Image (cartoon, rainbow, N blue to C red):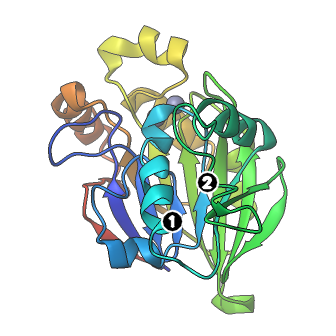
Amino acid sequence: MEIRVLGCHGSQLPGRGFTGFLIDGTTLLDAGAVTSVLTLEEQSRIDHVLISHAHLDHIQELPSLADNLCYIRKNDPLTVISMPRVINTLKRHIFNGAIWPDFSILPRAEKPVLQFEPIRSGEKMRVGHLRVTSIPVNHSVESVAYVIESGQGPATKTAIFVGDTGPTEKIWSVAGKGKNVRAIFVETSLPGEMAEMAEMTGHLTPAGLARELEKLYPLMPQIYLYHMKIQYCEAIRSEIERLKNGRIQILQDGQVIRI
Ligand SMILES: [Zn+2]
Ligand SMILES: [Zn+2]
């Protein structure tokens, strides 16, 4: 499995984007960064988009992706997968004909550029050549982690994208039972001095991340940290160093990870 980091920050500045991961060139996980990073040809290869939750930093470039694909005349529609409530939010507040066109009926209702497919909590779904399971996490709005498996039998490899969350439980027990879990992508948005804000908004600090990772024991996969608020990158980085956990790597935009 190849994971290309299109954006991995909890804020946006030139050269640093909101969350977007491209898996094997065809599946996008969150759409906070995609059209500002990929060429039109690379965008045209995307056939599925998994959305963790409806916050703007995870969906903001989905409208421009749909618009770009509409004029490429792709054969198959782009399938947007998320929880039913998130899909309703996208339909009502973004693709509503007022903020942006309803691309689920364009260019023609019988052959649209966009289609929505609900995934329910705990459901496992085939997405292209991948198998995807959604697990609810603990954020200020409904949000899920995605467990993504590729390969068959003993060759199965699993990556887990925990998404925006405060302290949570289920995803760690699911990870403990996962097949060959190679990488876990987990947020750490704020430093220790902002712990109260982190708790209020459903995010983690480095100390909170350390407590979450204890729930994984004895599993010790590579941990990729992302979703840092840019203003606090340095503070978070030094708090992470003090944890002395060699398995934690802070992600950078543009990085490519192969598991
Ligand atoms: Zn969020
Ligand atoms: Zn976010």
| Residue for point 56% across, 31% down | 98
Residue 155 location, quadrant? bottom right
Residue at numbered disc 2: 103
Work out whether residue 126 or residue 226 is closer to the camera in this orientation and state it. Answer: 126
Along the line of sight, the residue nearer the viewer: 116 or 178? 116
The kind of residue on which mark 2 rests is Phe
Q: Which residue bears the numbered disc 1?
A: 70
Q: In this view, does 209 lie above or below 134?
A: above
Q: Residue 241 carries which label?
A: none
Q: Going 35% across and 58% down the picture, which residue do you hit?
A: 35
SS for dot 1: helix
Apparent side of residue 185 relative to residue 146 in the rendered image (left or right): left
Rendered residue at 61%/54% (across/down): 103
As drawn, 199 above or below 75:
above
Q: Nearer the viewer, residue 255 or 168?
A: 255
Q: Residues within 10 Å of mark 2 (few under 14, many from 20)?
A: many
Horizontal placement of 130 versus 198: left or right?
A: right
How busy is the neighbourhood of tag 1: few (under 14 within 10 Å), some, or many (20 plus)? some
Is residue 120 something one can see in this rendering? Answer: yes
Q: In the picture, residue 38 is in which quadrant? A: bottom left
Marks 1 and 2 in Cβ contact (< 8 Å): yes
Q: Is residue 2 visible?
A: no
Residue 91 image position (x, y, % from top left): 68, 39
Expressed as whole percent of the image width and height from the top left, the position of residue 116 reads 73, 55
- Identity, as a three-letter code, of the amino acid under mark 1: Cys
Q: Which residue is drawn at 60% across and 49% down?
A: 51
Q: Is mark 2 on a helix, strand or loop?
A: loop
Instruction: Report x, y in % for residue 84.
Output: 80, 42
Of residues 236 and 255, the one drawn nearer to the viewer in this rendering: 255
Cα gap from disc 1 to disc 2, whole angstroms:
8 Å
